[in-house]
Image (cartoon, rainbow, N blue to C red):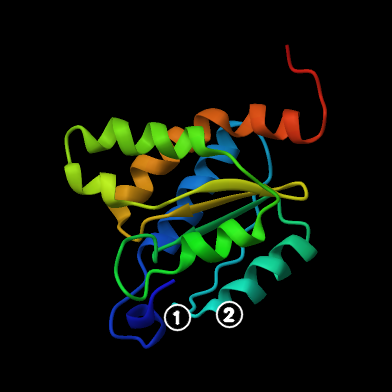
């Protein structure tokens, strides 16, 4: 999500990075990874529509990037929080604390994680550096998350 990337003022770099890192990670797990990427402005109705469409299309994971700060147009956390069935605060708390100890600005992120039906939903900051950091930690919990979502005893 970015007004400026949507308007073509600058190139979306975090979305393609999420795609690449996800495909690379799933390949290491010997799983297929198909993606769909959409750039939208920071608009409530568009975000709601895209989130619902991804769930309707049975995506296993939704990543949003951008619109997680404290700026006047940063709306992703509020919209996503209303959309999800349950929140998973631990992973984002860990990321904020881990990276915020070295870079205090990371503590301003309002990123969140949750579940809608059987779809994992993660809102990430818009910077490529943050995307790298967040996905490094998220990938550690993905397989266990899928097992839990589908009621599979992985112990």
Classify residue 126 as left or right of residue 84.
left
Residue sitting farthest toward the right? 151
- Residue occupied by mark 2: 46
Q: Return the disc, 2 or 1, that comes first in the chain's sequence.
A: 1
- Report how far apart the C-alphas of labels 2 and 1 lie in the structure: 8 Å
Across and down, in percent, residue 150 comes to: 81, 34
Classify residue 106 as left or right of residue 87.
left
Circles 2 and 1: CB atoms closer than 8 Å: yes
Quarter of the image holding residue 134? top left
Across and down, in percent, residue 14 comes to: 38, 60
Which residue is found at the position 33% from the left and 51% from the top? 109
Eyeballing the image, is 122 above or below 144? Answer: below
Label 2 residue SS: helix
Quarter of the image holding residue 128? bottom left
Across and down, in percent, residue 20 comes to: 47, 52
Quarter of the image holding residue 153? top right
Question: Considering depth in this image, is 142 or 35 the residue closer to the camera?
Answer: 142
Which residue is found at the position 36% from the left and 76% from the top? 73
Label 1 residue SS: loop
Instruction: Please identify the quadrant where the C terminus is shown.
Output: top right
Which residue is found at the position 17% from the left and 34% from the top? 102
Eyeballing the image, is 76 above or below 42? Answer: above
- Residue occupied by mark 1: 41
Q: Which mark is residue 103?
A: none
Residue sitting farthest toward the bottom? 7
Question: Considering depth in this image, is 37 or 86 the residue closer to the camera?
Answer: 86
Classify residue 148 as left or right of residue 44.
right
Q: Residues within 10 Å of mark 2 (few under 14, many from 20)?
A: few
Classify residue 31 as left or right of residue 24.
right
Which residue is found at the position 65% from the left and 61% from the top? 83
Question: Considering depth in this image, is 134 or 71 the residue closer to the camera?
Answer: 71
Across and down, in percent, residue 154 comes to: 74, 17
């Amino acid at each position: 999500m970015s007004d400026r990337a949507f308007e073509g003022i600058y190139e979306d770099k975090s979305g393609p990075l999420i795609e690449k890192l996800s495909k690379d990670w799933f390949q290491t797990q010997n799983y297929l990874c198909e993606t769909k990427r959409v750039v939208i402005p920071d608009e409530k109705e568009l975000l709601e529509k895209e989130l619902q469409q991804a769930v309707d299309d049975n995506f296993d994971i939704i990543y949003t990037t951008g619109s997680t700060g404290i700026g006047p147009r940063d709306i992703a956390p509020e919209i996503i929080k209303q959309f999800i069935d349950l929140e998973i605060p631990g992973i984002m708390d860990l990321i904020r604390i881990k990276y915020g100890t070295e870079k205090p600005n990371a503590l301003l992120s309002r990123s969140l994680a949750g579940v809608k039906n059987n779809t994992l939903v993660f809102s990430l900051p818009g910077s490529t550096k943050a995307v790298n950091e967040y996905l490094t930690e998220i990938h550690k919990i993905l397989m266990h998350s899928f097992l839990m979502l589908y009621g599979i005893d992985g112990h």
